[in-house]
Image: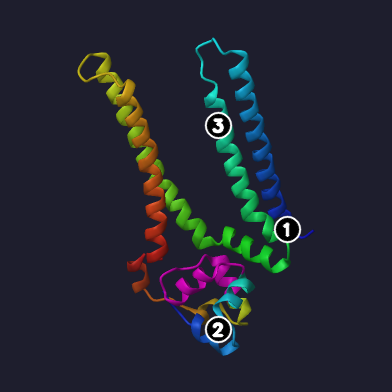
Amino acid sequence: MNERKAWITNRVRLGWGLVVLGVALLVAGGILGVLNAGSGWNYGVIGGLGILAAGFGVGQVLRYRPALRDEASARRVVAEERDERTVQIRTRAGNRAWIVSAVFVWIALMWVSYASNGNVPALAGDLLWWYLVTAFAVPITVYAGSIMLDERSS
Amino acid sequence: MRNRLEEMRSRCGWTQQELAERVEVSRQTIISLERGRYNPSILLAFRLARQFGTQIEDLFLYSPEDDRDE
């Protein structure tokens, strides 16, 4: 097996590993939910993590498995993944998203500090939920937007 | 940075996809290089020059103005 196929095979294995982990988490979440029905805890969060892992794993398998069929596909997929311009664009996007993410964490830190003195409302309940949604969605949007802009301009 | 990539590729009769496969990059990278929108790493520049059997300086034409574009 050449180096390209070995690299793709590792990606496929990682994908299957994530699928297995995801299914295991999903089952574990279900079993814990049934066994501890009266505990007041919602074990759906474990199942949710399982669905996320399995979904990511299926994506990996679907992306890389067809590339194992022939050498030309393997060469094309590896070239796309390791392409220096693509890597550069993704890295730049990641840096921008990280900065935005760090700003959100810093704002939350300041907010909680002020809230402890009663200067601003406490970051809790719906407010906390919306803040976390925003802090999750904005960096992802920055990441995707940065990739789209750089793909056009470079 | 200006370059003679398109000229040399056409001379060899290769498509952008063929050249991309030869140097193991995406076709989009070859397009960006030919349009002068992307400057390659030194390794890619060497790989490209080797494909055309030439020197980097013959393929990529540096001028001091390029520093201002960075």
Which one is nearer the viewer's eye here, A7 or B64?
A: A7
Q: Residues within 10 Å of mark 2 (few under 14, many from 20)?
A: some
* Residue type at numbered disc 2: Arg
Depth check, mark 2 against mark 3: the one in front is: 3
Q: Which quarter of the image is occupied by the N terminus of chain A?
A: bottom right
> Is residue B49 inside the magenta stretch?
no
- In percent of the image, x 57 and y 62: which residue is there? A80
**Secondary structure of the magenta portion, mostly?**
helix
- Badge 3 marks a residue whose secondary structure is helix
Q: Residue furthest top?
A: A38
Q: Which mark is residue A35?
A: none
- Badge 1 marks a residue whose secondary structure is helix
The residues tagged by marks 2 and 1 sit, at their Cα atoms, a distance apart of 28 Å
- Residue B52 placement, left or right of B65: right
Q: Which residue is mark 2?
A: B9
Depth check, mark 2 against mark 1: the one in front is: 1
* Residue type at numbered disc 1: Lys
Q: Which residue is mark 1?
A: A5
Which one is nearer the viewer's eye here, A74 or A114?
A: A74
Query: Disc 2 is attached to a residue of which chain?
Result: B
Q: Which residue is mark 3?
A: A49
* A117 in relation to A139, above or below: above
x, y percentage for residue B7? Answer: 50, 86
- In percent of the image, x 62 and y 49: which residue is there? A60
Query: Disc 1 is attached to a residue of which chain?
Result: A
The residue range painted magenta reads B24-48
x, y percentage for residue A139? Answer: 38, 42
> Is residue B28 inside the magenta stretch?
yes
Q: Which quarter of the image is occupied by the C terminus of chain A?
A: bottom left
